[in-house]
Amino acid sequence: MIRVINKIKETTVRFIKILMSMLFIVFGLDKATGFKVKKTKYKLERLGTEYGGWVVPIDLLNENSICYSAGAGEDISFDCLLAEKFGCNVYIFDPTPRAIAHFEELKKSVLSGQRMNINRSKDLFYKIQKADLEKLKYYSYGIWKDDSIQKFYAPKRKEWVSHAIINSQKTTEYFEAQCKKVSAIMKELGHQEIDLLKLDVEGAEYEIIDSILKDNLDIKVICVEFDEINFNDLKSFFNIKRSIKKLLRSGFELINVDGSNYMFIGK
């Protein structure tokens, strides 16, 4: 009986996704959620590798921009290109030991004039120079809905890097790390506004978005990966819809969808 119910749920989700795909073609809607993807006057450009890249409005960014990047892993090609292309400071937040080691290795490689692979790739290398590297500010704590110590659960496969507060993979290994809410970080760093906030936080995005909206923070662009976008269950589908709806109601517009990466611009 349980198998039959689960099969019905999976079939329902597939049907919804097919319907959404059709609506996307006809009305310019996001095929996964059905929300309208607005046209924008800003020039959009994808920065970074196929795995770690994000679409951003490049004419909203300049050397004075403040960019927060939550979630680094072993591919910070996006963060590097923000610093290289715009000359702005990029504040990176990730307590994962391998992510920290990756960033330290990148610094050593750049300072010694050596090439370094992106995400252990044989073909992709960082091109960042010393002057731009100094614009990357790495903080070894996580972003969360409050200031607290949180458990970060390991992924199922050892080769994967990202650990998560939300234990969606049901693993038992974890490490503990300090986390801070975005408003607290802004106060600590002396920032009144954020030009771009990227959230690649393995399921913690819902709580963080709620915290941002509750604190009424001044953020121009929010780039968020909805980690559950490929989960074939109704709970995940409605979690994403609720979070997007909250952003839209708070004055943000959905401007671009790139796989599971969504980009919003405040009005």
Image: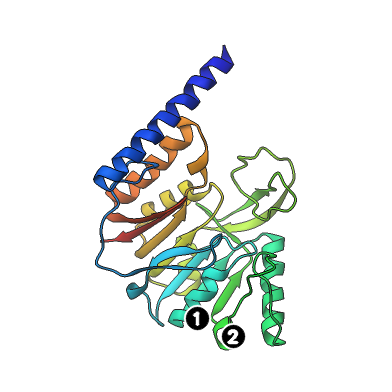
Residue 176 location (% of width, % of height)? 69, 53
CB-based contact (under 8 Å), mark 1 and mark 2: yes
Q: Which of 22 and 193 is in front in this view?
A: 22
Q: Which of 5 and 95 is in front in this view?
A: 5
Q: Label 1 is placed on what type of residue?
A: Glu
Q: In this view, does 223 lie to the left or right of 135?
A: left
Residue 94 location (% of width, % of height)? 61, 62
What is the crowding at mark 1: few (fewer than 14 residues within 10 Å), some, or many (at least 20)? Answer: some
Q: Up-down: is 157 above or below 103? A: above
Of label 1 and label 2, which has the lower sequence position?
A: 1
Q: Up-down: is 36 above or below 190? A: above
SS for callout 2? loop
The colouring scheme, among rainbow, by chain, secondary structure or one colour, is: rainbow
**Which numbered circle lies on residue 129?**
2
Q: In this view, does 261 lie to the left or right of 220?
A: right
Residue 30 location (% of width, % of height)? 34, 46
Q: Which residue is drawn at 47% across and 32% down?
A: 235
SS for callout 1? helix
In the rendered picture of this protein, how many numbered marks are placed on residues?
2
How many angstroms separate mark 1 from mark 2 (CA)?
A: 8 Å
Quadrant of the image containing the N terminus: top right
Q: Up-down: is 90 above or below 235? A: below
Q: Label 2 is placed on what type of residue?
A: Gln
Q: Which of 161 and 43 is in front in this view?
A: 43
**Which numbered circle lies on residue 84?**
1
